[in-house]
Image: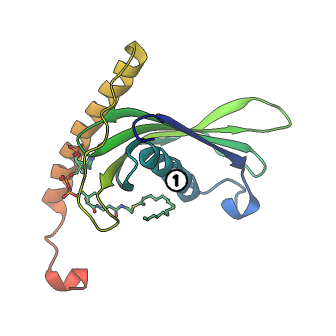
Amino acid sequence: MSGMQREVTFRFLAQPTDVNFGGKVHGGMVMKWIDQAGYAGAVGWSGAYCVTVAVGGIQFVQPILIGDLVTVHAKLIHTGTSSMHFAVDVLARDLTHGKERLATSCVIVFVALDGPDGKPTPVPAWEPKDDGDRTLQEYAQRLIELSKRMEQEVAQYRPPLRHEDVGG
Ligand SMILES: CCCCCCCCCCCCCCCC(=O)SCCNC(=O)CCNC(=O)[C@H](O)C(C)(C)COP(=O)(O)OP(=O)(O)OC[C@H]1O[C@@H](n2cnc3c(N)ncnc32)[C@H](O)[C@@H]1OP(=O)(O)O
């Protein structure tokens, strides 16, 4: 039921196909897991088809190795009209030693659409319940501001796209 499921957790083992030549999981693979967990959270919250629009504050803190137990935890921390902002932590645990460590964290933003090729559609509003929630919501809002400033910065240096550049 939409508006009821705030958190999603994926848990699996890091496999040889996930790692680079140095034996560490590719950053791109970690981002794929983040995208998938965020997508599951966004669809679970909104009950609609969702697309990724932004990722902010991503930090690769520690590597993930083959055989580590990986936990990807996505938690809704802010909703706009059609957007849902999830704080995602990726944790890794060497099963032989048992200690879990933070590998990667970020905030990922999804927008609910009224169909796979549709337009943004409203999502159920989420309200913070305690000070911890309020702190996370403020963090999401600060990242939106930073993202807008970054877009303005990038726009100054990106040449305008021509019609033929986009395959039209
Ligand atoms: C039925 C099929 C089943 C399939 C099931 C199988 C799938 C099983 C595997 C799934 C695995 C995972 C999948 C992941 C999902 C993808 O990876 S989707 C692919 C990557 N993403 C895209 O292609 C999206 C491309 N972007 C777009 O199409 C357009 O930007 C959008 C999202 C339609 C928005 O259009 P727009 O005209 O910019 O709309 P606008 O009203 O201005 O903004 C909408 C909202 O986005 C927010 N926004 C826009 N830009 C930003 C930004 N940079 N930062 C923050 N917020 C932003 C706005 O603030 C606004 O928020 P609200 O105020 O409504 O809360």
- Quarter location, residue 17: bottom right
Residue 20 visible in the current orientation: no
Give the residue at x 38% y 13%. 131
Q: Residue at x 40, y 14 (%)?
A: 130
> Hey, what amino acid is under mark 1?
Gln
Say above or below: 101 vs 36. Answer: above
Look at 53% across and 56% down and name the residue there. Answer: 32
Measured from the top left, where is residue 61 in percent x and y?
56, 38
Side (left or right) of 148 relative to 34? left
**Mark 1 lies on residue:** 36
The residue depicted at 36 percent of the width and 39 percent of the height is 85
Residue found at the far front of this picture:
1
Position in image of residue 74 (x %, y %):
50, 39
Q: Where's the C terminus, which quadrant?
A: bottom left
> Within the image, what quadrant is residue 165 found in?
bottom left
Image location (x, y in percent) of residue 159: 15, 69
Nearer to the camera, 77 or 5: 5
Question: Is residue 7 found left or right of 53 in the rendered image?
Answer: right
Q: Vertical placement of 22 versus 95: above or below?
A: below
Check the image and tell me how it is coloured: rainbow
Q: Nearer the viewer, residue 51 or 69?
A: 51
Question: Is 159 positioned to the left or the right of 68 in the image?
Answer: left
Crowd tier of the residue under label 1, counting other residues whose Cα lies within 10 Å: few below 14, some 14–19, many 20 or above:
some
Q: Secondary structure at mark 1?
A: helix
Look at the numbered disc 1 and say if its residue's Cβ is closer than 8 Å to ligand 1.
yes
Ligand 1: image quarter: bottom left
Q: Seen in the image, is 64 located left or right of residue 79?
A: right
Whether 152 is drawn above or below 146: the answer is below
Q: Say which quadrant the N terminus sits in.
A: top left
